[in-house]
Structures are given as C-alpha cells and as structure tokens.
C-alpha cells in the first residue's frame, strides 16, 4: 500500500520495535520512510523521527470523527505532537459537535413542551 507524507502509520524498526506515528519523509530510491514516532514499545523512540523500510510501514485506516471521545483523543495527540493547526481544527469540530447536540436537545424539548401528556397542543 502506497503511503504519503502526513499519513498515520504503524511500523517496526530494524530492531523489531513497534512504532506508531506519521510519515515525515520518503526516499523512494532507497525504499525508506521517516516516521515521527508518537508511540512505541521503546520509550526512547517516542518523539523522534525514525527511518524504517517502506515495506514495513502499514497505513492506518481513516475514521469518521462523529464521536466526542474520539475527537478528544485526537486533540491529546495533536497536543503531544505540538500540531497547533490540527489542534485548532479538532477543537472546532468538538465545539460544532457540542452545538449540534445542544440544538437537538432544544428542539426535542420545545416539541415535547408544546403538548400535554395526552398529546394535545397546549
């Protein structure tokens, strides 16, 4: 599977360590990718760019961001990677999601408040 700069990936290193991060650079001639590690089973690898063979890299699936908890987790990741633009984008998505839920609650309340318990308009 072809990966591009910015893709989130899982990979292993030449020492067999597992890393999770995003592609910072690609060298197709040498068949290697530079992955910025945000998680690893080797604590010393976290927060560093690591060069791995491109064939060891597996692209992470993309997810729809409709769950507030998922967005909060990604906000934590944006903070960990110090990606201010992504942080702002995710924060905006979280605010929009909260506003949409508030609007649905308000609509449901106004619809239920306008009828009595027998279902007749008040």
Image: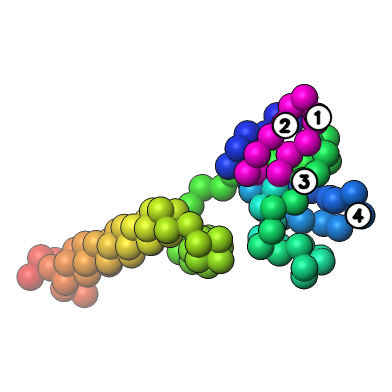
Instruction: Quickly name the residue at label 3.
Output: 51
The stretch of residues the image draws in magenta is 23-34
Where does residue 12 sit, x and y in percent of width and height?
Answer: 84, 50
Marks 2 and 4, Cα distance to the nearest angstrom?
21 Å
List the single residue furthest toward the top.
29
Marks 2 and 1, Cα distance to the nearest angstrom?
6 Å
Earlier sequence position, callout 3 versus callout 4: 4
Q: Main secondary structure of the magenta part?
A: strand
Q: Residue at x 71, y 64 (%)?
A: 46
Q: Residue at x 55, y 61 (%)?
A: 81
Image quarter where the C terminus lies is: bottom left
Marks 4 and 1, Cα distance to the nearest angstrom?
20 Å
Q: Residue at x 77, y 56 (%)?
A: 19
| Residue mark closest to the camera, 3 vs 4 | 3
Instruction: Quickly name the residue at label 4.
Output: 16
| Residue mark closest to the camera, 4 vs 1 | 1
Instruction: Quickly name the residue at label 2.
Output: 27
């Amino acid at each position: 599977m072809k990966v591009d700069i910015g893709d989130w990936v899982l990979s292993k290193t030449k020492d067999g360590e597992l890393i999770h991060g995003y592609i910072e650079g690609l060298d197709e001639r040498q068949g290697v990718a530079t992955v910025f590690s945000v998680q690893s089973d080797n604590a010393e690898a976290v927060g560093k760019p690591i060069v791995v063979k491109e064939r060891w890299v597996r692209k992470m699936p993309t997810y729809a961001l409709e769950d507030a908890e998922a967005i909060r987790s990604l906000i934590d990741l944006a903070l960990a990677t110090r990606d201010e633009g992504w942080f702002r984008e995710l924060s905006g998505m979280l605010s929009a999601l909260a506003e949409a839920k508030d609007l649905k609650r308000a609509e449901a309340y106004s619809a239920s408040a306008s009828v009595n318990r027998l279902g007749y308009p008040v």
